[in-house]
Amino acid sequence: MFIWLDQLMQLLVTNVFGLSMDTRLGSSVHFFFYDTIKIIILLGIMIFAISYIRSYFPPERTKKILTRFNGLKGNFMASLLGIVTPFCSCSSVPLFIGFVEAGIPLGLTFSFLITSPIVNEAAFAILLGTFGFKIATIYVVSGVLLGVLGGVIIGKLKMEKEVEEYVYQLKMGESEVEQLNHKERVNFALENVKDIVKRIWLFLLIGIGLGAAIHGYAPAALLAKYAGPDNPFAVLVSTVLAIPLYSNALGTIPIAEALINKGVGIGTALSFMMATTALSAPEMILLRKVIKPKLIATFVVITGIGIVIVGYLFNFLINPIA
């Protein structure tokens, strides 16, 4: 997809920096500049496209849509809306309260909460450019299925009593859904591109920098031995280690790319990404304001098990990149 960029960066490394592509340093420098430019291009395109779609689904409209669905169809719709609706740890509490106040079942709420942070336009853009359409699509489908199944299970457990009592007593009120014309939606999408890039550029550069270091200097044989697809515990360990951490998913993708190129299983790397995004410590701390420890633990265990299964399926179905 970016052959021209790869060749241009090779010229930059050899002619401008005076480095050989056969050296570790030259390979690392090429990785850094190539991935940075590639990701910025993909981010701009994908964030604009999804943001335009997102302009049709503000939180108030999302709540109204979800109130029309029940059962498995409702969980599926909640997960799909999670893809095109902005969600991060900072918005988890107001969204949760808004959904509960609107009468949306707990299972549907968690389908949304699971899928929304895992699957977003920026992550898809980087995955598409890094691993190709096949892996990016499987990642999105996996995120949706995790949300659907996790929400269904939580809904069946009937854990409404594990929500703090004050949440049911709050009345957030109705706000009018703003109607935008085409020009306003385009402006909204452009502003969203600038806002997201502004917020994630540092995470992105740090992740690409670490990925470049791994690409050039990490011992491939050692990584393949202990974190390769043939290690039956690699996915489990990577998921468990990721749960208490906080990391921006966009910054972890370049690291995952470098690890996979060194022989680490695709499922192992992607399960780590999913766990840091869906089960980060800050999100759990914020959710504690509205749900009790038992429900938080249930959410973490169910989602964690789902991520582990997805990781093993990735390793089983997709051959590691050489």
Image (tube, rainbow, N blue to C red):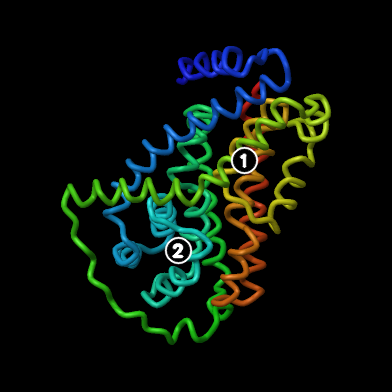
Q: Is residue 266 above or below residue 187?
A: above
Question: Does dot 2 land on a helix, a strand or a loop?
Answer: helix
Q: Position of residue 11 (x, y in %)?
A: 54, 13
Instruction: Locate residue 191 relative to residue 271 in the image: left or right.
Output: left
Q: Name the residue that disc number 1 marks.
A: 207
Left or right: 201 as drawn, with respect to 67: right
Q: Is 236 placed above or below 213 here? A: below
Residue 71 visible in the snapshot: yes
The quadrant of the rendering that contains the N terminus is top left
**Front tag of 2 and 1:** 1
Q: Is residue 148 visible?
A: no
Identify the residue shown where x is 62% and y is 70%: 285
Residue 17: numbered disc:
none
Gap in angstroms between the C-alphas marked 2 and 1: 33 Å
Which residue occupies the foreground of this view, 74 or 272?
A: 272
Classify residue 215 by image quadrant: top right
Q: Is residue 5 above or below residue 114?
A: above
| Residue appearing at x 36%, y 36% in the figure | 45
Q: Secondary structure at mark 1?
A: helix
The image shows residue 162 at horizontal and vertical percentages of: 58, 78
Amino acid under label 1? Gly
Disc 2: which residue: 108
Q: Residue at x 51, y 45 (%)?
A: 201
The earlier-in-sequence mark between 2 and 1 is 2
The local crowd at label 2, few if under 14, some if 14 to 19, many if 20 or more residues have their Cα within 10 Å, is many
- Residue 174 pos. (x, y %): 28, 76
**Measured from the top left, where is residue 164 in percent x and y?**
55, 82
The quadrant holding residue 41 is top left
Q: Nearer the viewer, residue 287 or 103?
A: 287
Q: Compared with residue 69, is residue 189 higher up or lower down, i.e. above or below?
A: above
Question: Image check: 290 left or right of 186?
Answer: right
- Identify which residue, 49 or 290, lies in the foreground: 49
